[in-house]
Image (cartoon, grey):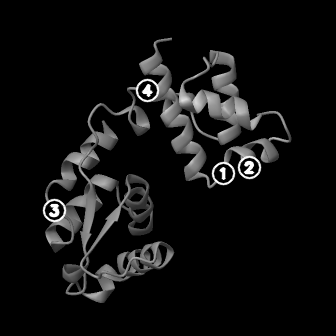
Amino acid sequence: MSSEYAKQLGAKLRAIRTQQGLSLHGVEEKSQGRWKAVVVGSYERGDRAVTVQRLAELADFYGVPVQELLPGTTPGGAAEPPPKLVLQLERLAHVPQEKAGPLQRYAATIQSQRGDYNGKVLSIRQDDLRTLAVIYDQSPSVLTEQLISWGVLDADARRAVAHDEG
């Protein structure tokens, strides 16, 4: 394993650990000593080579797919991330309540969870769009067209949905 690859792998390991709010000592505690802080730290610095078996076990411990830990991959394995799905909240306010009610409630819930109250735009994930499609009893692509027609989503959203359904 090249030292550059080991450093990139280590950076991914550190990112996953910190996203989960764990210190190196926290990993050791949570794993009941299975993962020693000094060993995980050496993996993260790229000072120590990690076997495929140990990497798979560490991915399992963190609850992430192994490919998320490998350098040169982006989340979900996409070569180019799909365009973001950005709701135009100011335009959503002008859509009749009987049409936009479920979307307004869903957006308000996301804003509350994130503590994001800028009131102009809200980024949503593909999973959010799929959930909304279930609520509206439509396919994600049909719902996307409807949201574009309301002016709530930009036309770029079509590429994101096509990427997801492709």
Q: Do the residues labelled 2 and 1 touch (CB within 8 Å)?
A: yes
Report which quarter residue 34 is drawn in.
Answer: top right
Location of residue 51 in the rendering, given as x and y in whole percent from the top left corner: 64, 15
Q: In this view, does 134 lie above or below 34?
A: below
In front: label 3 or label 2:
2
Location of residue 61 in the rendering, given as x and y in whole percent from the top left corner: 71, 38
Q: Which amino acid does label 1 sit on?
A: Leu
- Residue at 59% from the left image edge and 38% from the top image edge: 64
- Residue at 61% from the left image edge and 52% from the top image edge: 20
User: Distance from label 1 to label 4 (Cα)?
Assistant: 21 Å
Which dot marks residue 26?
2
Q: What residue type is labelled 3?
A: Asp
Q: What element carries label 4?
A: loop
Badge 3 local density, few (<14 within 10 Å), some, or many (20+)? some
Identify the residue under disc 4: 71
Pick whichever of labels 2 and 4 is earlier in the sequence. Answer: 2
Q: Are marks 3 and 4 in contact (CB under 8 Å)?
A: no
Instruction: In the displayed orientation, state which residue is furthest to the right.
Output: 32
Identify the residue under disc 1: 22
Res. 166 visible in picture? yes
Location of residue 76 in the rendering, given as x and y in whole percent from the top left corner: 42, 37
